[in-house]
Image (cartoon, rainbow, N blue to C red):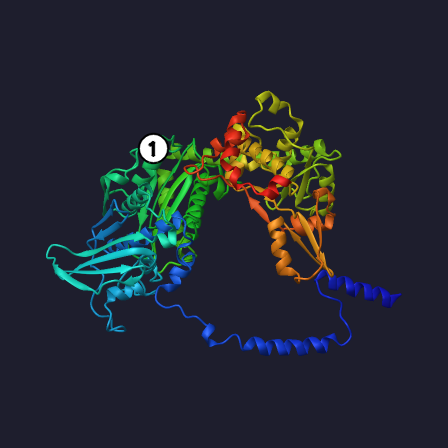
Amino acid sequence: MAKSAAKKKTTKQQDLFDLPPRRKGAGKAAKSAARSSSRSDDSGYTAKHIEVLEGLEPVRRRPGMYIGGTDEKAMHHLFAEVIDNAMDEALAGHATFIEVDLEADGFVSVNDNGRGIPVDPHPKFKNKSALEVIMCTLHAGGKFDSKVYETSGGLHGVGVSVANALSERMDVEVARDQTLYKMTFERGKPKTKLIKAGKAPNRRGTRVTFKPDPQIFGPNAEFDPARLFKMARSKAYLFGGVEVRWHCAKELLPKDGSVPEKATFHFEHGLKDYLASNLEGATLVHPDIFTGSAGKTGAHGACEWAVAWTADSDGFLSSYCNTIPTPDGGTHESGLRSALLRGLKDHAERVGMDKRVAPVTSEDVMTGAGCMLSVFIREPEFQGQTKDRLATAAAQKIVENAIKDPFDHWLSGNPTAANKLLEFVIERAEERIRRRQEKEISRKSAVRKLRLPGKLADCTSSAAEGSELFIVEGDSAGGSAKQARDRRTQAVLPLRGKILNVASAGKDKLAQNAQLADLVQAIGSGTGAHYREGDLRYDKIIIMTDADVDGAHIASLLITFFYRQTPKLIEHGKLYLAVPPLFRLSHGGKIVYARDDKHKDALMKKEFHANAKVEVSRFKGLGEMMAAQLKETTMDPKKRTLLRVVLADKEKTPTAKAVERLMGTKAEARFDFIQENAEFASEELLDV
């Protein structure tokens, strides 16, 4: 009996890993075959298969490694790299102006009156000028030597060379020693040699003119005037010592008048002016903007900031390091938060409010705060070439020490306004605590109300973070999902068939619908104007329907409901679609699952021999799947596939119009859509 049980266990384990049963003598045969296979494979893999990419070829092969992708944002990063070089000259005290010219043919030029890129022969590449080395060689530049640049945005020596590699054409003009030099590049390779173009007695600096390569960014690779205008203007805000001159061809100007043809920017008060323009029309809690600077701009360890609290907005924090935007934050932002929290708590202690301020966190302080922060440090560390997040550990202390004392003096200078600000922050903390308590209560009450056959089976975790709600169709699928789930973090809410189409239903029907009421109560965040992100009871809302047309219809109705009633839930990336399998393929103990017919055909070729008699079974629905199968394929976070629901580009595909057309009350609009897209419908889809 023991031997039999052991034998069964071994066979079960082998099935688990898709291994064939072990036969006597199979080990020696397998080793012999492996050695034979190894010898035959070795002859097909030689040194000639090792490819070495030289120059800028790696950039063109894998642009995402250098600029994060090939989308519109990544394309505009080329402009950021070029203008950052000009800005580094200004920060070093060698340039007083930067000119940006967007031309009608799609080229953009950036010109500065700095020292100009060196043009003399490079000592390591004597047959090449320093200009050619900088433009055509990765990790080449003057930013590695702190004697040349105290602080700079360019750190790796790849910025302008990457822009060159990904440009259809780039023209570089350098004015040095009263002489003008020119050189042209195409897709990262020199088109001409460095030539002397004549005398330039009244000119100095560098002009770079380039156009993104449509081979990399697609046939519609064009700069957005509004985005370039905003990027150019921000440089003037970040460094008051530079004048930024803007010019845009008339043919490219937006019709809404948001971008001028010509403009000159020079902001003496820097970030204070920047913040004031962003907060125009807002109601300030404290009447003054807390602004200041420490250290010399362009020197190691300098810092500039502007902070104001608004009573009618959620606030924001825009940070920069050496004039480079850091949208993902970093250590310098941590220093700002810490300094503001310590300053308010110290003020509370001085006025006898230390007990009330005890539960206040940096999150409460930053709620409603509009902040601009700019730091200048030598050799900063970023996460990735796109420099979205600052990782320099010393930056936190630099910012915290720079802001703490000025903030104390600012609060002490106007105690009445400071106390009003303190009350505002304490109210934010009390509201946060109250919401957390209501959330816990609502979770308990929702469970009590919905704990009925075929209703909500909640998870045991009381925290929203990491928890998931699976919305499934029908009690049968709900039963399988409840058995397959992780009870600690996964909740299941079965629905009875297709829900109400909220795009075509009136408010009365919507209010009287019991299924939607249960769904809203289970989620806990409210709907419409009463939606509160902080009350959301789950980190992920997952729609899990059958992998057929009916399932797709139910999923469409649910997505329409969330888009109409809780659009911020989608905007914040909380809504997902599960991807259950439609087919189960098995042969000789090997089992794989396919999402659809196309995936099935691919797996048949990839996973099984050509002559294998593969058993193909089609799932009629989630309820037909065993709990173990449902867990393995659809619910286990380690193995499943989830599709995040996102809103389409508002300019290219207005989501509201699309929802109204496909889900609204006008049947003729849907009929027109069907006629327009009938040619794309496959025969397989029509047969289902």
Secondary structure at numbered mark 1: loop
Q: Is residue 253 above or below residue 607?
A: above
In percent of width and height, residue 604 lies at: 64, 57
Please state the horizontal and vertical placement of residue 193, each as a whole percent of the image. 21, 65
- Residue located farthest toward the right when viewing the structure as drawn: 1
Q: Quadrant of the C terminus?
A: top right
**Does the image show residue 251?**
yes
Q: Bin the neighbour count of mark 1 within 10 Å (Cα to Cα): few under 14, some 14-19, many 20 and up.
A: few
Residue 455, position as x, y percentages in the image: 71, 35
Above or below for 19 versus 491: below
Instruction: Pick whichever, 582 or 396, lies toward us.
Output: 582
Q: Is residue 509 left or right of residue 364?
A: right
Q: Position of residue 665 (x, y in %)?
A: 54, 25
Residue 429 visible, this angle: no
Count of numbered badges drawn on the protein: 1
Of residue 313 and residue 36, the one placed in the foreground of this image is 36
Closest to the observer, 386 or 248: 248
Work out which quarter of the rendered image holds the N terminus and state it: bottom right
Q: What residue is at 35 percent from the left and 30 percent from the top? A: 281
Residue 492: name its quadrant: top right
Residue 498 as seen in the image, left or right of residue 288: right
**Residue under label 1:** 280
Q: Outermost residue toward the top?
A: 508
Q: Check disc 1 and give the amino acid type.
A: Glu
